[in-house]
Amino acid sequence: MKVYQRLAANFKAEGVTHMFGIMGDANMYWMHELDKLGGVKMLEVRHEGAGLGMADGWARATRTVGVATTTCGPGVSQLATAFLTASRAESPVVAFCGEHPTNDQDYNQRLDNARFAAGCEAGYVRLNTPDDADDAVRKAFYMAKLESRPVMLSAPMDIQQKNCEDDEPYQPSSTLIPPRAVRPDPEALRQAADIVAGSRHPVILVGRGARWSGAGEAVLKLAKRTGALIATTLMAKTWLSEDEYHVGISGTYGTRTAMKLFEEADCVIAIGASMNRYTIEHGYLYPKARYVQIDSKPHVVMAGGRSADTYIQADAKAGVEGLDRMLEERSYKNVGFRTPDIKKQLVGQYEDRKEYPIEPGTVDPRDVIRTLEDTVPTNISLFTGSGATAGFSNIMFSRQRPLVLPSHFFGCIGQMMPAAMGAVVATGNKPAMLVDGDASVMMHLAEFETMVRYNMPLLIVVMNNEALGSEYYKLDAHKMKSELATISTPDLGAVAKAFGGKGRLARSAEDVRSAAAEWVSKPGPMIIDARIARSVVTLPYRRIHYGQDE
Amino acid sequence: MIEVNERIVVPSAPRAVWGVLSDPRAVVECVSGATLGERQEDGSYDATLVVKFGPTQVKFGARFTLELDPATMSGIVVSKGKDSIGGTRVQAKMTFSVEEQADPPGSAIPITSEVEISGRLASLIETGAKLVVKRMLGDFTGRLAQRCAGPGPA
C-alpha cells in the first residue's frame, strides 16, 4: 500500500465527511484515493485560504474538526490569514498540506512548512517517514481537538509515494481522548458562593464555552436565584435572550443601557468567557465588581492582567450547577437587578434613533438591519462580518437563531464569507444569512462561484458604503481626507447573476425587504448589494472615534 | 499625544478671571467631575477626576502643580495621574494666560494643552480622546464664565 493511500484511509477513519481546498500535484494522489474510498465530499474552492476559512466555519458551527487541503508551496502560503483567524477563533482544524520532495531542496515550489505554520500560530505535524502515516494523522487530529486549534499536517511528496504496511487497523484520535467533563473544586465553589452571596447586583456574563457545554438552563436558574442580569460576549450574541433581564453584549458592542447598569454591578460571574479587553473594556465596564470565573481551562488571565477573585476550573454546566446548588443550600435568594424599573429600562435598548441626513440613492444602514431582522425568519442562522458595518449588525440584530456567529478573530476582513459557507455545509445546507461589508465580501468574491456550484443556500447582504469603512471614519475623525478610503464597486447583484446565482441592488429599505423576501421564499446563493449611507456612524465609532456619550 | 490649542473667552474683567484661575480650589470647582484633595508639602495638590469616554466612566487620581506668574497673569499646570482599574496613565501640561479683550469686553484666555494617555485605556478611546478633552474644555469655559460673573442679583 502507498503512504498516500494509508493517509487517505486514516482521514476517513477519523470520521471526516467533507473537506475544502484546491487540488495540486502534492495532494492529488491523496484526494484521488479519498474519492475512491467514498464517503468524503471534496468541495473545490477558488483560493486555498478560503478553503481553510470554510473548514474553520465548519469547526465553529459543529465543534468537530474541519478539514482543508492544499498542494505544496504556493498552495500552503495562501493559508496565512485563514490559519491565524482559525487560531484566534480556537477552531479545531486539520489542513492536509503537501510539501516539496525531501530529496529535492531546489524544487520550484519549496517552502519551509514548519516555519510557516509557526508564524501562523498553527500546530505542526510532519510525515517524516512512511511508518509515520498513522501517528501523523492521529496526532494532527488529537492536537486539533485537544488544543482547539488549527494544525498543519505536512506530507512531503516523495514520502507519500513510498510503500507502507497496512497489517494493523488505524486507531483514530478518539481512542486517545477520554470524554470527561472537568468537575469544579468544592473549595473554589464555596469561595465563589461567598462572593455571590455577598453581592447585591450581580451580572452573569456568558461566552461560547457556556453555550458549548449546554449550560443554558443552569445559567437561567442561577440568574433568577441571584437577581443577575444576563450579558453575553460578542461570540455568544443573542444566546439566552429569552430571559427578560438579558442586556445583550458586554463590551464594545454593548448598549448604553447595559453599560450604565454594569457600572452598578458589584459581582460578575463569567462563564465560558475569555474576559478579554473588548468584553470588559479592561475592567472599566465593571468598576465596582468582584469577579467569579468558570472556565474549562486551567486558568484564564482577564484583560487588564488580573485574575478573577475566584477562578473555578470546570466544565461550564457543571460549574454553574455546582454554584447554584451551593447557594440553594444556603437558602440564598436575591432580587438584585430583577426589578420592574430595570425591566422598563431594557425596553427598546437596542434602538438607535439618532437622525442623520441620508445621501440620495442610499439607505440608512440601521434600516437594512431592521428590515432583515423582520424579514428573515428566526429559523435561519446569522453570520456577521467584521469592519465598520459590524457596528450596526452586532448591536442591532437581537433575535435568537440556530446559529449566530460573529467575526472579528484576528481583526481581519474577508474571512467571514468562507466561514459562513463552511458553516452552511456543516449544518446540512440549511439556509443562512451573512451580513458583511463591501471590502470584506469583495476580498473572496470568487467564492460566490463556489456557492453557486454547490448550490449553497446562503444570502450575502453587502452593507456597501463603497469604502474601507473603518479607515474612512478614522480619517474623518482626524479631519484628514476620508475620501482616500473610498473604493467604488460594481453592482454586486449583477455580479452574482453573472456567476449564476441570484442578485439584487438595493437602494431603499423596501428594496432590501423585497429582495430578502424573494430569497426567503426560495433560498439559494444570492447577494443583496445594499447601498448604505456613509453619513450614519455606528455607535461604537461614535464613542471611540468621535468621543460621544451614546 | 493629544494637543489642544484653544482660545476661550469669558465676559469678565481680566483681574476677576485671574482671581479664579490662580485659586486651585476655584479652578477645580470649574472642572466637571473633579475634586481637590490635600495640598502637599512641596506645594503640589492631589485631585481626582472622573472622565467619561463614551458611556464608560474612568476615575483618575492625580497630583498637579501650579506655577503662577501674577505679573503676566499666566500659569502652567502640570499633572500626572493614573486610574485604579486599568492602570491607565495620564500626563498633562497646560499653559494659559489671561488677556484683556476689548470687543466684546471681557477676557481672552489662550490655553495650550498637551495630554498623553498611555496604557490600556488608550486602545479603547483612540481619536475620541481629543474630542473628550475639547468637550471638557468647553464645559470648563462655561463654568469659569459663571464663576467669574459671581452670584447673580438676588
Image (cartoon, coloured by chain):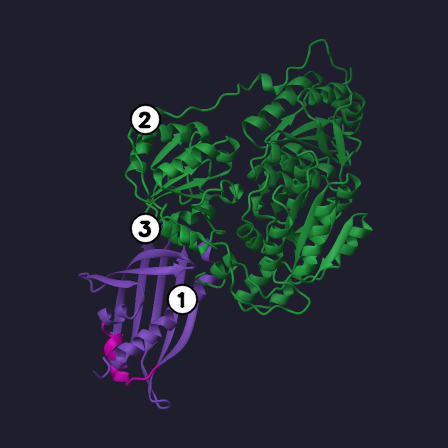
Chain colours: A green, B purple
Pick the front one: A7 or A549: A549
Where disc 3 sits, the SS reads loop
**Where's the N terminus of chain A, which quadrant?**
top right
Where disc 2 sits, the SS reads helix
Q: What residue is shown at x 53% (from left), y 20% (from top)?
A: A179
Q: Amino acid at mark 3?
A: Ser
Chain ID, mark 1: B
Residue beneath disc 1: B133
Residue beneath disc 2: A187
Q: Amino acid at mark 1?
A: Val
**Marks 2/1 same chain:** no
Which numbered disc covers residue B84?
3
Residue A483 rendering spot, x and y as whole percentages:
64, 67
**Marks 3/2 same chain:** no
Looking at the image, residue B75 lies above or below residue A211: below
Estimate how packed mark 3 is, as few (under 14), some (14 to 19) or many (20 or more) residues with alpha carbons within 10 Å: some
How far is the residue under mark 3 from the one under mark 1?
Answer: 20 Å
Q: What residue is shown at x 35% (from left), y 38% (from top)?
A: A226
Q: Which residues are magenta?
A: B10-23
Residue B97 rendering spot, x and y as whole percentages:
32, 78
